[in-house]
Image: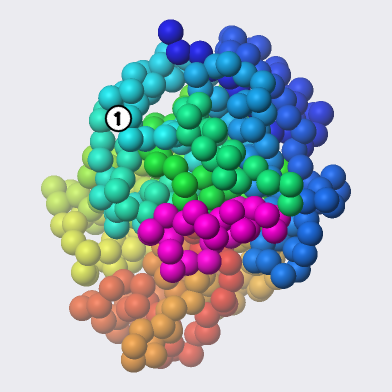
């Protein structure tokens, strides 16, 4: 029978108390050790000559905390494995132990893997460039492991691998750790100057895999052991909505906090979010996850059997548009018909056209539109440009005032329908003299 020790890296008594309660509520009975996180205030002896290095003091202290957690395990525990967790994680509410045992059983068939990410930030855009292997819920790759997943929120590591990483990198100060790093680079990193950051260091020395769906997820508040992450709640939105993870399956506080974030309303302006999708199985699955937490969206897709221009199901928040699913000009046609519907039947000040996989930062949207007269020709989002210098807003999140929506529909006969929809809209607006309000409301994808 495999034995497991859990080490939490905690930045405060409140986080320690939270994790203690979580273990109790979920009946997780593994031995647990709470280690005080290293911070710049308690690491003066470690942070020598930091100004000459690449890392910030917080990054270095986070790195030191992870290595120290593994070192504590080697020195004080006789268990076969250690799970190292940061202080902002939330475990599966049901069957965590059973799921973990399944992962270990799979892992034992793939002895080349030194540790497994059980909580992380997925990297789907880069992951497609890797050679990924799979055994049921266990995944690993032969290329750069940092491209597959990112972050050390929670991971389980074998004793032998833990000892090897400690022998390499458990040093009394930064300079000695840097010197150790210089002498032990894996070939894939030989031409890089890598930071002393735990997210890079441990994958750099050890062969990793990851489990999906993940057993542990990050909560939407920032970890106290590494300050400085921007829009942490948006990372968590992305984690849930892009990767089809249901927060209700994790410890309750995470789901409650998540609901409070995504359902934050824009009080001074009425906003409608249109989400374009193609009704494929993947898009329908994403829509099911969205609908649990977002009540201010209209989901738009083409239905070739429809006998009217459009049909709206209020209960399902589903707007069907007559026509065939195509990228060009289908996306543009679908957008125009949806805007026509909203102008006829909906009350709004700002309309945001996104995709099913767009994660809209509604808090920043609120801030931006409140600084702008939304009764005017408001056109906002992430500004891009084509090779022939047509400026446009990226189609994953186009914000338009009601006035501008009317102008778009009134001039739709002038739209070019042989180019992507977002470029076509930008081209028309440019010809009309409408400038882009360059904001940060764009989804994190």
Please name the residue shown 59% across and 54% down the image: 180
Residue 190 magenta-highlighted: yes
The residue lying toward the viewer, choosing from 285 and 145, is 145
Quadrant of the rendering where the N terminus is positioned:
top left
The count of marks equals 1
The residue lying toward the viewer, choosing from 276 and 320, is 276
Q: Is residue 378 visible?
A: no
Indicate the position of residue 319 as horizontal and vertical percent values. Answer: 33, 48
Secondary structure at badge 1 equals loop
Indicate the position of residue 25 as horizontal and vertical percent values. Answer: 63, 12
- Up the image or down, 68 lies above or below 405; here it is above
Quadrant in the picture for residue 339: bottom left
Please name the residue shown 43% across and 46% down the image: 149
Where does label 1 land, which residue? 110
Q: Is residue 41 visible?
A: yes
Quadrant of the rendering where the C terminus is positioned:
bottom left
Left or right of 346 on screen, residue 329: left
Please name the residue shown 84% across and 45% down the image: 42
The residue lying toward the viewer, choosing from 219 and 417, is 219
Q: Which residues are magenta?
A: 174-197
Q: Residues within 10 Å of mark 1 (few under 14, many from 20)?
A: some
- Up the image or down, 132 lies above or below 382; here it is above
Indicate the position of residue 374 as horizontal and vertical percent values. Answer: 61, 70
Which color scheme does this rendered protein use? rainbow
Left or right of 185 on screen, residue 5: right
Residue 110 magenta-highlighted: no
């Amino acid at each position: 029978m495999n034995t497991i020790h859990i080490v939490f890296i905690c930045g405060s008594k409140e986080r320690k108390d939270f994790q203690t309660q979580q273990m109790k509520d979920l009946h997780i009975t593994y031995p647990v050790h709470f280690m005080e996180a290293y911070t710049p205030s308690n690491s003066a002896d470690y942070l020598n000559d930091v100004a000459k290095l690449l890392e910030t003091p917080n990054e270095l202290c986070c790195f030191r905390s992870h290595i120290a957690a593994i070192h504590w395990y080697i020195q004080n525990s006789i268990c076969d494995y250690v799970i190292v967790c940061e202080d902002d994680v939330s475990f599966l509410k049901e069957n965590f132990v059973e799921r973990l045992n399944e992962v270990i059983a799979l892992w034992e068939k793939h002895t080349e893997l030194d540790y497994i990410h059980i909580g992380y930030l997925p990297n789907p855009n880069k992951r497609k460039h890797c050679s990924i292997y799979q055994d049921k819920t266990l995944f690993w790759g032969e290329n750069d492991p940092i491209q597959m997943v990112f972050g050390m929120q929670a991971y389980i590591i074998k004793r032998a691998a833990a000892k090897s990483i400690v022998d390499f990198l458990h040093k009394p100060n930064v300079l000695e750790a840097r010197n150790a790093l210089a002498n032990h680079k894996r070939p894939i990193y030989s031409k890089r100057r890598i930071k002393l950051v735990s997210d890079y260091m441990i994958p750099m020395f050890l062969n990793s895999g990851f489990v999906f769906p993940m057993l542990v997820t990050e909560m939407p508040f920032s970890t106290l052991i590494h300050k400085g992450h921007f829009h942490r709640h948006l990372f968590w939105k992305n984690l849930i909505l892009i990767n089809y993870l249901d927060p209700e399956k994790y410890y309750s506080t995470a789901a409650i906090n998540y609901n409070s974030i995504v359902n934050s309303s824009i009080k001074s302006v009425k906003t409608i979010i249109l989400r374009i999708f193609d009704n494929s199985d993947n898009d329908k699955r994403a829509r099911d996850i969205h609908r649990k937490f977002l009540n201010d969206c209209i989901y738009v897709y083409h239905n070739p059997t429809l006998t009217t221009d459009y049909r709206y199901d209020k209960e399902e928040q589903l707007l069907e548009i007559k026509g065939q699913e195509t990228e060009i000009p289908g996306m543009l046609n679908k957008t125009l018909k949806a805007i026509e519907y909203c102008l006829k039947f909906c009350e709004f000040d700002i309309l945001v056209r996104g995709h099913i996989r767009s994660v809209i930062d509604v808090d920043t949207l609120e801030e931006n539109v409140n600084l702008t007269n939304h009764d005017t020709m408001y056109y906002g989002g992430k500004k891009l440009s084509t090779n022939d210098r047509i400026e446009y807003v990226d189609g994953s999140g186009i914000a338009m005032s009601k006035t501008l929506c009317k102008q778009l529909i009134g001039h739709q006969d002038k739209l070019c329908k042989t180019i992507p929809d977002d470029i076509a809209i930008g081209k028309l607006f440019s010809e009309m003299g409408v400038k882009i309000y360059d904001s940060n409301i764009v989804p994190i994808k």
